[in-house]
Image: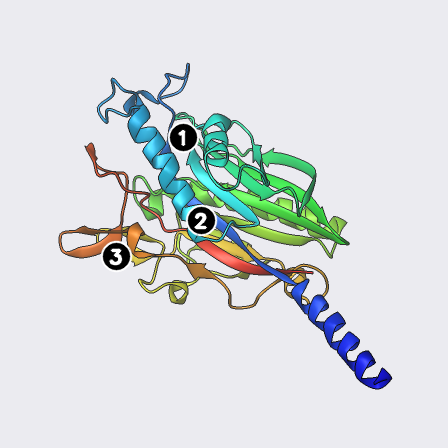
Amino acid sequence: MHKAYILLLSFLLISIGLNAQTYRTVAFYNVENLFDTLDTPNKEDSEYLPSGKKEWNSERYFEKIAHINEVMDSLCSPLIIGLCEIENKAVVKDIVSRGNLKTTHNIVHFESADARGIDNALIYDSTVLLLIDKGRIRFEMPAPSTPSRDIIWAKFIRGDDIILVMVNHWPSRRGGQAESEPKRMVAAIAAKEFINAQQTANKDVKIVFMGDLNDYPTNLAPSMISDLLVPMISEKSGKFGGSHNYRQEWGVLDHIMVSKSFLKKKGIKIQKKSGKIHSPDFLLGEYRGNIVPNRTYGGAKYLGGYSDHFPVTIEVKIK
């Protein structure tokens, strides 16, 4: 009887230990032009005003906020969410306060020098992660280009782990890939220097690098980062072969890469091969007979969709 009791107790302790391991997602989502409806001085946001050509108003704004929270729910309340194409901290606060993240998640945000007022932001579960530092990386664009979005970063503690998260939105391909590539190279060099400095200071730091890089994995600028970190998103991560569709061609513009230290068994750990491009039916639209992301606008026409990008995630195991 005593032996049976010990075996039962051992089984219960093992079960409790296994149940203590929690699986969560880390996500990145380009939400496509989430502007408020107010005219911001010194920013080129007139297109997204009630009087602008897109007739952006409160009804459309709050519908988009609801759509973003629908996406968050489909991703099972991620541990960390990187966002790009948000106008300011206020719109991120609206996402959090109007969804299921409001009691658990906090925000990291910095105003960038982007002419349109487009920024990056980070939402994180403050019941799991302790924020210990944050900042931004600003880089100078080659003349005569206007300033781009800052890379924002945040550093967290979880147990014995130091976790560094970087959110990127590199310069666009406007003017063509070859002509615009030098701008993305500037962003890549700035990001690489920062990663090198962090890993030199602490070889065990666990890094998550995420963002819309406006380049594909094989392009030169993203390759500079994948020389240091492990890419988690590829064409095979989703059923359409990409996170974005341009002229009926799919490609991976939205990336998540992690340091090798994040793949080790000790502490919080990234699940290998867990990278995923999410494309549930509600995120799908149609254009000229082809499946495309269900976006908010097609030109100046309001479509009432979600974004022109799909969200991407990886999975982490928390002990």
Instruction: From the image, tell me which residue sits under label 1.
Output: 145
**Residue 193: % across, % down:** 62, 46
Q: Quadrant of the C terminus?
A: bottom right
The three-letter code of the residue at mark 2 reads Asp
- Residue located 67% across and 43% down the image: 155
Say above or below: 154 vs 262: above
Q: CA distance from mark 3 to mark 1?
A: 28 Å
The three-letter code of the residue at mark 3 reads Glu
**Residue 184: % across, % down:** 45, 44
Q: Secondary structure at mark 2?
A: helix
| Mark 1 burial class by Cα count in 10 Å: few <14, some 14-19, many 20+ | few
Q: Who is closer to the viewer here, 307 or 111? A: 307
Q: Mark 2 or mark 1, which is nearer the start of the sequence?
A: 2
Q: Which mark is residue 249?
A: 3
Label count reads 3
Work out whether residue 157 can be spotted: yes
Instruction: From the image, tell me which residue sits under label 2.
Output: 73
Q: Who is closer to the viewer here, 222 or 289? A: 289
Left or right: residue 148 versus residue 190 is: left
The three-letter code of the residue at mark 1 reads Ser
Q: Secondary structure at mark 3?
A: strand
Residue lying furthest right: 2
Please state which of the two labelled residues, at mark 3 or mark 2, is closer to the viewer.
2
| Mark 3 burial class by Cα count in 10 Å: few <14, some 14-19, many 20+ | few
